[in-house]
Amino acid sequence: MTSTLPWELLHTFLGVLREGSLSGAARALGLTQPTVGRHVSALERALGQPLFTRSPTGLLATDAALALRGHAEQMEAAAAALQRAATARGGEVRGTVRVTASEVIGVEVLAGVFATLRERHPGLVLELALSNQLQDLLRREADIAVRMTPPEQGQLVARRIGSIELGLHARPDYLDRHGRPATLAELRSHTLIGFDAVTPFIRAGSSRLGGIGRDSFALRCDSDLAQLALVRAGAGIGICQVVLAKREPMLERVLADQFAWPLETWIAMHEDLRQNTPCRVVFDALVEGLARHIGT
């Protein structure tokens, strides 16, 4: 085996692992497909064993590739940390920070926070990854995360901001046409807006709604932004943040005394980034912005 493995080969290797094909990795990495193929072949020659096998669905990682993945990801994290340290020089805050959050938090709250950050620190490059799936901060899928559950990984620095309450809402004109439910059971006669995929989070919400679940939703979508848009359009009754609904005269809360779902809000980042100036600046700005949003 070659004594030194060039980082570019390992970087390409991770791209192929994640995308499952040479063409997908080429698009993700901004390389040509032949270049990706050459990098994989060169790495296989250096290691003296195959890393991928072809299948009808793409490239499958061998046991050797899976064993190498963790080490390559550690190098990736170190390279990213080196880049952040190199760009955070002098008195100016410079560097790239990747933040992950849910769709609603990202659009309704973080957009304004990011705008203010760029005005204060023009050297900052901000990446916003919106997903309801938890990104792994230990694997550096993001630098900072806004989460609705307490972080459980011990290597994270976390700050609890407060609770965001969820409630049932609809447009007044929808309620005028279809009536205002007096009990949770009466919701079943309404057009309900909810999720399509059943997750532990959804099951928890279903228990709070008296057993109302996926089969009761006439409008199903796994995008919380789309659900909010449907509620705002007057399509039916759905769940949204109480603090957002209070800002909109065209949304009315229903069954407030029977359904209230507080979600703890946390901001977390890897403890290794505690002394990284760009990450610390963004972390503090998120704390300030979310606290203002919640009203704490």
Image: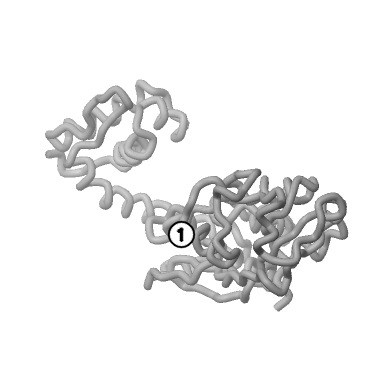
Q: Is residue 101 left or right of residue 117?
A: left
Q: Is residue 202 left or right of residue 284?
A: left
Residue 143 to residue 52: above or below = below
Q: Position of residue 75 (x, y in %)?
A: 32, 51
Determine crowd level at label 1: few under 14, some 14-19, many 20+ residues with C-alpha closer than 10 A: few
The quarter of the picture where the N terminus appears is top left
Residue 230 to residue 242: above or below = above
Q: Tag 1, which secondary structure?
A: helix
Q: Is residue 181 left or right of residue 211?
A: right
Q: How many marks?
A: 1
Residue 167 to residue 54: above or below = below
Q: Which residue is at 69% across, 55% downward?
A: 238
Of the residues shown, which amino acid type is indicated by label 1? Pro
Q: Which residue is at 17% across, 41% downward?
A: 64
Q: Which residue is mark 1?
A: 200
Q: Position of residue 10 (x, y in %)?
A: 30, 41
Q: Nearer the viewer, residue 256 or 119?
A: 256
**What is the quadrant of residue 219 in the picture?**
top right
The quarter of the picture where the C terminus appears is bottom right
Q: Position of residue 11 (x, y in %)?
A: 35, 41
Q: Nearer the viewer, residue 211 or 271?
A: 211
Residue 211 at least partly seen: yes
Q: Position of residue 46 (x, y in %)?
A: 17, 35
Residue 127 at least partly seen: no
Q: Which residue is at 80% across, 65% downward?
A: 246
